[in-house]
Amino acid sequence: FGFKKSFGQNFLKDSNKNIVLIEKDNCGEGASSKNTGKLAFMQELIYHKLEKNYSKSIADLYLKSQIEAIDLVIDIINKNNIECNLFKQDGYVFINNDSDKDKLDKEYSFYKRNKINCDIINELPIRFNINGGIRIKKCSYSFNPYKYLVKIKDILKNSVQIYENTRAVVVDR
């Protein structure tokens, strides 16, 4: 029962369906609880690749889906008063090789075309050498995923059957 499963269960809980969650371990104690808890639409220099390999509209659609997914998580946190140390921060993508400057420029152009508040940087706010980057202002969030998942489990427990430390071997309808 990690971050991805928590979304599905949260939406299905009010569906008048018999929802069962089977988790081979304890809910919220897997990889999702041990990560940095970052919500960001930047994933390396991906958007210019989507434009090149597919189209501008596909890249735009992917960006929109990422922003909507972040908004969805924030909405769940706010509506359910989940105390998970949520805070908004700048996001960064950067390069380590001068040979990637063209890719960085294309990514920057993509962000600007999509009215993303960003700027070109030559250094990060931490001690880590880069050959260039983009700072996207107040676009990402950090939070404690374990606190989030514990609260989601608590919210779901009255409407979803949760079986922890269980493996599904056979499923009959």
Image (cartoon, grey):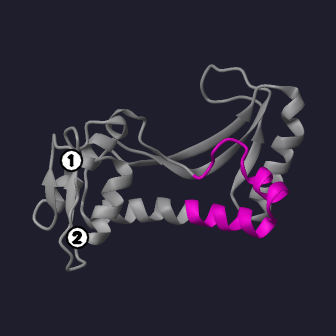
Q: Which residues are magenta?
A: 41-66
Give amino acid for label 2: Lys
Q: Secondary structure at mark 2?
A: loop
Query: How many tags in the picture?
Result: 2
To which quarter of the image does residue 165 belong?
top left
Residue 128 at x, y = what percent? 65, 21
Q: Is residue 47 magenta?
A: yes
Q: On the picture, is 17 further left or further right than 41?
A: left
Label 1 sits on residue: 150
Q: Is residue 152 toward the left or the right of residue 54 in the image?
A: left
Examine the image and state in which quarter residue 93 appears.
Answer: top right
Q: Main secondary structure of the magenta part?
A: helix
| Closer to the eye: label 1 or 2 | 2
User: Dot 1, crowdedness within 10 Å: few (<14), some or many (≥20)?
Assistant: some
Residue 171 on the magenta span: no
Q: Residue at x 67, y 68 (%)?
A: 61
- Across and down, in percent, residue 102 comes to 89, 41
Left or right of 32, for residue 49: right
Tell me whether circle 1 and circle 2 mark residues in contact (CB < 8 Å): no
Report the disc number at residue 42.
none
Q: Is residue 160 above or below residue 118?
A: below
Look at label 1 and name its amino acid: Val
Q: Which residue sits at x=59%, y=25%?
A: 126
Mark number, residue 13: 2
Q: Is residue 14 above or below residue 69?
A: below
Residue 65 lies, in percent from the top left, at 57, 65
Q: Position of residue 140 (x, y in %)?
A: 53, 50
